[in-house]
Image: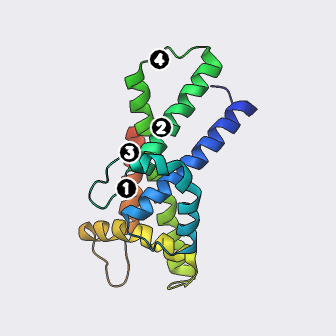
């Protein structure tokens, strides 16, 4: 698809809303501080569209899957709208569309973790132990990922190489998802 203003606006607004929904899901998954001002902003931004879904969808244990489901619906809608605008009709295999949307969401989640890991590394050099809400949230988001990577590569005398493993894993997975993601 060409990069004209309509495509740019639809993709930007759709991806921005998907980002906020995925952040809500990932912060919940990482058990980040709910009372952090940034977390509260994300909850307030997404509460209105998520309320109907939260009534319909059951929780999976303590996990609320409604942000993930709404992100998938928004991604599907965004792709379908762009196809209709540029091809005139939506004669696309729905299963293919759903799979591409899932791959696109997985790619977005990996991108969030990539940038959060990079941010965490930079914060650990510049302002370790910062009390600002943003570094705390980034740290809480990436901490489970770092712990998982440190099981494979333990810290070597104060030098933590786990971010390198995380970056490599993200790049490999994104490389595999690239042909399917839109």
Residue 182 seen from this side = no
Q: Front-most of 133 and 42? A: 42
Q: Residue at x 38, y 71 (%)?
A: 143
Is label 3 or label 1 in front?
3
Coordinates of residue 117 in the picture (x, y in percent): 46, 65
Q: Residues within 10 Å of mark 3 (few under 14, many from 20)?
A: few
Q: Which residue is mark 4?
A: 92
Distance of label 1 from label 4 (alpha carbons): 31 Å
Q: Are marks 4 and 2 in contact (CB under 8 Å)?
A: no
Distance of label 2 from label 3 (alpha carbons): 15 Å
Quick one: quadrant of the N terminus?
A: top right
Tag shown at residue 56: 3
Q: Residue at x 38, y 66 (%)?
A: 30
Q: Front-most of 127 and 72? A: 72
Whether residue 64 is situated above or below residue 57 in the rendered picture: below
Mark with earlier residue (2, 3):
3
Coordinates of residue 62 in the picture (x, y in percent): 30, 62
Mark with earlier residue (2, 1):
1
Residue 169, quarter of the rendered image: bottom left
Is label 2 or label 3 in front?
3
Whether residue 84 is situated above or below residue 147 in the rendered picture: above
Q: Which residue is mark 1?
A: 64
Distance of label 3 from label 4 (alpha carbons): 28 Å
* SS at circle 1: loop
* SS at circle 2: helix
Tag shown at residue 73: 2
Q: Residue at x 72, y 31 (%)?
A: 6
Residue farthest right in this picture: 5
């Amino acid at each position: 698809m060409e990069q004209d203003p309509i495509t740019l606006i639809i993709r930007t607004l759709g991806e921005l809303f998907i980002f906020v929904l995925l952040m809500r899901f990932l912060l919940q998954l990482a058990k980040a501080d709910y009372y952090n001002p940034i977390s509260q902003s994300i909850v307030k931004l997404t509460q209105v569209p998520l309320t109907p879904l939260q009534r319909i969808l059951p929780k999976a244990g303590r996990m609320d899957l409604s942000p993930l489901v709404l992100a998938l619906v928004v991604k599907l809608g965004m792709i379908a709208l762009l196809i209709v605008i540029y091809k005139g009709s939506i004669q696309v295999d729905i299963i293919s569309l759903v799979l591409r949307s899932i791959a696109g969401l997985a790619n977005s989640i990996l991108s969030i973790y990539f940038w959060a890991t990079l941010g965490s590394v930079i914060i650990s050099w510049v302002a370790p132990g910062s009390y600002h809400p943003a570094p705390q949230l980034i740290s809480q988001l990436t901490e489970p990922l770092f712990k998982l990577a440190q099981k494979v590569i333990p810290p070597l005398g104060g030098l933590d190489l786990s971010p390198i493993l995380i970056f490599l894993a993200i790049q490999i997975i994104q490389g595999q998802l690239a042909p399917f993601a839109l």
